[in-house]
Image (cartoon, rainbow, N blue to C red):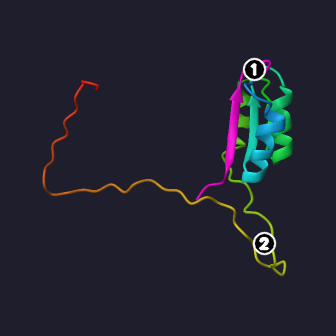
Amino acid sequence: HGSREVVVVASALATCDPGDVLAETLPRLLAAGVRVSAVSLQASVHVYKRLADETGGLSGVCLNAGHLRDLVMGHAVPPPAGGPGPGAGGGEVVCEFVEMGFPGRESSDVPTLVHASGVSG
């Protein structure tokens, strides 16, 4: 399982967006329950900071290579599972994780051949 989370690593000093991120994208992120975090390599950018603040994410500007490692590794720990669910008496915890997985590997006793062609159609 995983959470709905986006981590942005950027080195830009500003953004050039095709639309209004704060008026159009932010409400959609909030409605979908997506948590946005940002790691800036050069300077703090208002849009990244605001997205992180509004969605409950983290934002930071790295000072050196060690600090960059700390900022990125801070996202390796999963976020808390969530609070009590609606209608719960305060004891039930609802987990807002998204189910995901990887395809299983199949093995066979029968040898198989894989053919790859460099011709694109």
Q: Which residue is mark 2?
A: 85
Looking at the image, is mark 1 or mark 2 earlier in the sequence? 1
User: Label 2 sits on what residue type?
Assistant: Gly
Location of the C terminus by quadrant is top left
Residue placed under numbered mark 1 in the picture: 16
Could you tell me residue 88's position as x and y percent?
A: 80, 79
Q: Residue furthest bottom?
A: 89
Residue at left offset 37%, top offset 57% = 104
Q: Judge the density around disc 2: few (<14), some (14-19), many (≥20) Cα neighbours within 10 Å.
A: some
Residue closer to the observer: 107 or 116: 116
Q: Is residue 88 above or below residue 77?
A: below
Using a 10 Å C-alpha cutoff, classify the residue at mark 1 as few (fewer than 14 neighbours), some (14 to 19) or many (20 or more): few
The number of numbered badges drawn on the structure is 2
**Distance in Å between CA atoms under marks 1 and 2:** 39 Å
> What residue is at 78 percent from the left and 72 percent from the top?
85
- Is 12 left or right of 23, judged from the image as shown? left
Which secondary structure type mostly characterizes the magenta part of the structure? loop
Quadrant for the N terminus, please. Answer: bottom right
Q: Position of residue 111 (x, y in %)?
A: 13, 50
Is residue 5 within the magenta segment?
A: yes
